[in-house]
Amino acid sequence: MKLLVWQWGRRGAGPLLAASLAAGFAALPRTEAALSLAAGAELLAGPDAPDCAWPVATYAGPAGLAVRALAAPLLVAGLARRVAALAPDLALCAMPAALDGMMAATLARARVPWAVIVHDATPHPGDSAAFVRLIQARTMRRARALVALSRHVAARLAGDPASAGKTLLRARLPPFVFEVAPIPPPRAHGGALRLLCVGRLRAYKGLDLLADALARLGPRDDLAVRIVGQGPALPALARLRALPGVVIERRWVPEAEMAALLAWADAVVLPYREASQSGLAPAALAAGRWVLATAVGGLPEQLAGAPNGRLCAPEPDALAAAITALLAEPAPLPVTPDAAAWRDEAASLRAGLEAALSGRQDQWPGIQ
């Protein structure tokens, strides 16, 4: 069996997820996997770029997207020839992106059934909700099957009109591997507890909860907080910047830097007001860090059974108490990374995709 895994975003977790899944599929017996990423993907420029069988020119801004979208009908025939040369049995979209309609038309022309991983049932506050929702709904309607990465998302997708008549599969998100070499154990530096909050800085990430919690704790010599990520100048960030022991770095974080950030941290905090699931949580757990998260959305199921996972209510007092408890704990338990995590998840997902997407090719209806 041969699978085509694609994700045509240029930055963030989408390309990394696609590459990780393709590698997992390729590690299975009697299975081949072809990866398609945007030619300008940040991941392809890194030192450990994945093997990308099909880099696709996408766009570099709104004007480029408009031109590419208008030209899409003229490009489908050529893209279909490329798909035919790769000869996949099934295709999987790792995360919806703006040009997936072009790929949907291409796969229909090539008569290749496909599924899409839907990360969020609804856009988060602070996202471009109308645009994101439009793209995702169109992609969901065109796919044969949908994949959710948490029960929380799966339950909400089940009631979405765009998923009517679709097979809904659930998968697990293994830890992303940001660096092969082991990183130092937490608390080895012998100083204050290092608490890291990293990722997109949006209102739903609960930065206001973190500000309130740290204000309740007051100045402490045994706690250092680092907040790193890209986002608007939220009022909560101004409040956090004014607190002693807190450092704010408003900037894009490339995947190549994630290992260094996790190596700096003793604990990762996810003070979310809402969440679908987190790609950072399993990566931090696999790195032997504590993960302190609010019990919202899919986070409790991700941390269930994790020795270094900690959950609290999405309230300032509860978060402050949980941080105080971490300050009193010894170093987290050492963790042995599961080298087969992506392969095992790929095996489970392949079985589900085969069952959901199987059928005679001459009965494949294409886009409805």
Image (cartoon, rainbow, N blue to C red):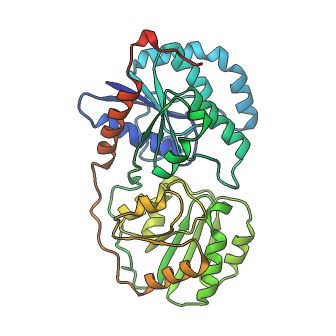
Furthest toward the front, the residue is 159
Asked whether 43 or 103 is in front, the reply is 103
In this view, 47 is above or below 70 = below
In this view, 350 is above or below 258 = above
Locate the C terminus and report the quarter of the image it occupies.
top right
Residue 35 on image: x %, y %? 43, 32
In this view, 335 is above or below 44 = below
Instruction: Name which residue lies at 38% across and 56% down.
Output: 179
Q: Is residue 29 visible?
A: yes
Residue 258 on image: x %, y %? 48, 59
Asked whether 143 or 165 is in front, the reply is 165
Locate the N terminus and report the quarter of the image it occupies.
top left
Residue 294 on image: x %, y %? 52, 68
Instruction: Name which residue lies at 55% across and 82% down.
Output: 320
Instruction: Name which residue lies at 54% across and 53% down.
Output: 276
Which image quarter: residue 86? top left
Q: Give the side of residue 329 with respect to residue 44, left or right.
A: left
- Total numbered labels placed on residues in the image: 0
